[in-house]
Image (spheres, grey):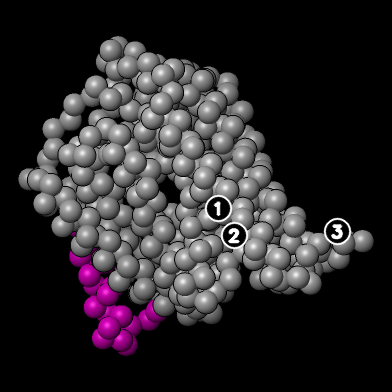
Amino acid sequence: MKIRPIYFLLIIAAAAFILDLTGGIDQVIIFILSAIGLIPLAKLIGEATEELAIYTGPKLGGLLNATLGNAAELIITIIAIRAGLLDLVKASITGSIIGNLLLVLGLSLLLGGMKHGTQIFNRRNAGVNAVLLVLSVAVLAIPSLFDRVMIERPESELLFSEGVAIIAIVVYGLSVVYTFTAKDLRTEHAGAHAKGEGHSAGEAGAAGGASALQREPAEVHTARWTLQFSIIVLALATVGTALVSEVLIGAVEPVVEQLGLTEFFLGIIIIPLVGNVAEHLVAVQVAIKNKMELSLAVSLGSSLQIALFVAPVLVFVALLFDQRLLLVFTDFELIALFVSALIASLIALDGESNWLEGAMLLALYLIIALAFLLLPETGVHGEAAEGARVMLMH
């Protein structure tokens, strides 16, 4: 079995864990090593899930991909919740969505467009995700607006976030069921497959969320791993991700102090890149292969899964650690989410893309990243945020 170059980074993951145990190493170095080490672990989780999906069949396999599509990031955020870094967790939620919609989609459009010119994709399939994308932003925005007028009733804030989380999970489940049963989606994918546009198991599995279920059921893929080996790899990669995530989260506060970065910036830019980089590479690779519809499914589908599944699940996970994770985000995050979702939806509904659109998405991502880098901590959670609340209350 050929070992992919990315898996040599597992040595760095082991080094980060060992160096953290022995001590005496600068925490900034530990943070960098653990961040790099999480990349191959996330890739292993995804690949093991794809191999399991081959054995379980298209429907159950699609459900596995929909459930475990963002497993690495889910593990990282759970560790952060246990450490009480709730601002980091919420920032990573919005950062993942923004990163998928601007950075990943932007790179895909740019590189795919530079190679193939204008790329055409099915507007109907992309339109389903576009509508869900707008809904997902609303799911994250409404509790934030509710919080502005209910700051004196914290029990109501938590109850509302829990209610929204339950509804979001139900909607996500319905979207999964829809992709199982929608004949138009299955027929169109079958047509693409007949024209030689079928996707590999790895590419389809990486689509994440409901979009991963939109594979043509008749496709047959040969497993590279045995069932037992796939299960063992998934278990070991999950444990490894948890251990290295513990190291990463433990180094957050020293990194914030030494480098002058905010916890908010680490959460909204760095953590999402670490947890999803393997999936991001797949989206770009399939765009270069002129499979733009699948690339959209990866970026949009992953965003939907974060908003409608991962974030709501974290609300209830926090309760297990006696923490209150409210689906309440800052004005800056909501504006960035709204702009990202709006532009991504317009591109998806258009049915075609080019490299200039990709360049504009990347430019917007860089502008947002620069703004969050320069934004002081008080600007995120201090006087500016409180001032906005007072203005809204009056």
Q: Which mark is residue 166?
A: 1
Q: Is residue 283 among what the camera can see? A: no
Asked whether residue 191 is drawn in magenta, I would say no
Crowd tier of the residue under label 2, counting other residues whose Cα lies within 10 Å: few below 14, some 14–19, many 20 or above: many
Helix, strand or loop for disc 2 = helix
Callout 2–callout 1 Cβ contact below 8 Å: yes
Task: Please tell me whether mark 1 or mark 3 is closer to you in this view.
Answer: 1
Q: Earlier in the sequence, mark 1 or mark 3?
A: 1
Helix, strand or loop for disc 1 = helix
Callout 2–callout 3 Cβ contact below 8 Å: no
Helix, strand or loop for disc 3 = helix
Q: Which residues are magenta?
A: 8-27
The quarter of the picture where residue 241 lies is bottom left
The kind of residue on which mark 2 rests is Glu
Q: CA distance from mark 2 to mark 1?
A: 6 Å
The kind of residue on which mark 1 rests is Ile
Asked whether residue 11 is drawn in magenta, I would say yes
Q: Is residue 260 above or below residue 199?
A: below
Q: Which residue is label 3 attached to? A: 392
Q: Which mark is residue 198?
A: none
From the top left corner, tell me how far across and down residue 368 is, in percent. 62, 51
Residue at point 53%, 28% (across, down): 128
